[in-house]
Image (cartoon, grey):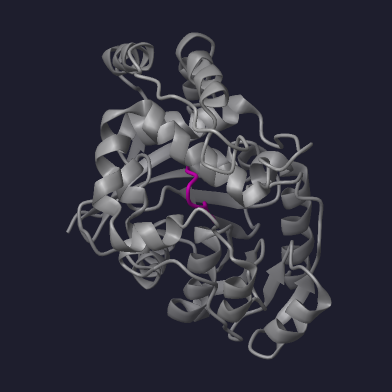
């Protein structure tokens, strides 16, 4: 089994970018269904304007260059290619910090926080299997398997003690790390999810579009559109971001810059991972963070006191905050300073 760690650079062939622009230019646009703009899906006028900017205004090469300013690597663990950023701090004895991104996001989620966090941590930020530059080679990749892979990665990098942070999908993986690699995990920090019960989710009607149920049952059907049409891929990603953040509500504003939205969409399209990124729903890996009291836990956007009371029954909560999220579920994109400050505060308590 190879344990080699190879330097990696993102270098998308120009032919792929030309193909993307050509497909965008040849999009067959449907008619707008009657009714309130967002109540029946992404409005045609909104998506058409965004797609036109993706084709003629968005600069992928500029985003690519920003990513390539950070040290990136590729390794293989149990046959699965793993792409990751690895920024060593100028402070040699500081704590390593493992960041796990969300769905439907990518490593682009952490673009604004990698540099600031490396001032205080050795930062390791991998692409989840089936996302972006970690192309999926097996069908079954559940939360526990990802956690064991991350533990193997940190061991391969020579880190004996490290912290873990995650948002959304990453908030599922990070507490699981405490269960599978307890002796090496110093603490777990997540953006939220603890103290919320499945009954609460059912009562709130989270996911009004029914996306979760559909992905759990019929992901292959959506995969054809995502794989063949960049606009189909973009529409789905934008709808998820908007549904999570409530952008579609009257008078709301978009908390995330459209270049960031399109950087994420470009990664999905150019790496052909739109379909595989959604497979965790089909394999039953989506849900709420697992409870664990083996290592200290910090939460940056924990919600009301009732959530904390429930969470404290089964977790060692040493930090519970409700910081500014910038109005977005994708906090590291919308309010990077907020999440950086909270990570420094939580892990500072553990030093």
Question: Principal SS element in the magenta part?
Answer: loop
The picture places residue 112, in percent across and down from the top left corner, at 65, 36
Q: Is residue 100 left or right of residue 113?
A: left
Answer whether residue 249 is visible to the viewer in this image: yes
Quarter in which the C terminus is drawn: bottom right
Front in this rendered view, residue 233 or 300: 233
Residue at x-position 49% and y-position 62%: 159
Q: Residue furthest left?
A: 1
Quarter in which the N terminus is drawn: bottom left
Position of residue 303 relative to residue 92, above or below, is: below
The picture places residue 53, in percent across and down from the top left corner, at 53, 15
Q: Is residue 135 left or right of residue 29?
A: left
Q: Quadrant of residue 7?
A: top left
Residue at x-position 50% and y-position 29%: 263
The magenta stretch is: 99-106
Answer whether residue 9 is visible to the viewer in this image: no
The picture places residue 77, in percent across and down from the top left corner, at 27, 58
Q: Quadrant of residue 335?
A: top right
Front in this rendered view, residue 262 or 181: 262
């Amino acid at each position: 089994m190879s344990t080699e760690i190879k330097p990696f650079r993102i270098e998308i062939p120009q032919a792929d970018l030309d193909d993307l622009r050509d497909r965008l230019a040849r999009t067959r646009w449907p008619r707008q269904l009657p009714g309130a703009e967002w109540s029946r899906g992404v409005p045609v006028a909104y998506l058409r304007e965004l797609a036109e900017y993706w084709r003629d205004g968005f600069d992928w090469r500029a985003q690519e260059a920003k990513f390539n300013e950070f040290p990136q690597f590729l390794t293989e663990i149990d046959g699965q290619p793993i792409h990751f950023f690895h920024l060593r701090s100028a402070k040699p004895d500081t704590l390593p910090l493992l960041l796990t991104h969300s769905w439907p996001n990518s490593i682009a989620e952490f673009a604004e926080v990698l540099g600031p966090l490396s001032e205080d941590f050795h930062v390791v930020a991998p692409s989840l299997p089936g996302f972006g530059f970690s192309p999926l080679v097996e069908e079954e990749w559940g939360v526990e398997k990802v956690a064991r892979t991350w533990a193997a990665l940190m061991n391969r990098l020579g880190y004996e003690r490290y912290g873990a942070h995650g948002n959304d999908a990453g908030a599922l993986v990070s507490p699981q790390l405490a269960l599978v690699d307890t002796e090496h995990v110093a603490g777990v920090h997540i953006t939220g999810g603890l103290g919320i019960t499945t009954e609460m989710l059912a009562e709130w009607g989270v996911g009004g579009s029914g996306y979760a149920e559909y992905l759990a049952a019929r992901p292959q059907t959506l995969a054809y559109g995502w794989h063949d049409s960049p606009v189909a891929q973009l529409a789905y990603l934008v709808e998820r971001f908007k549904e999570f953040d409530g952008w579609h509500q009257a008078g709301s504003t978009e908390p995330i810059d459209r270049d960031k939205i399109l950087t994420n969409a470009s990664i999905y399209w150019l790496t052909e991972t739109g379909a595989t990124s959604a497979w965790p729903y089909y394999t039953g890996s989506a849900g709420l963070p697992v409870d664990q009291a083996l290592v200290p836990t910090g939460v940056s956007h924990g919600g009301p006191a009732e959530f904390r009371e429930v969470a404290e029954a089964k977790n060692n909560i040493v930090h519970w905050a409700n910081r500014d999220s910038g109005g977005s579920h994708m906090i590291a994109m919308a309010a990077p300073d907020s999440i950086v400050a909270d990570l420094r505060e939580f892990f500072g308590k553990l030093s």
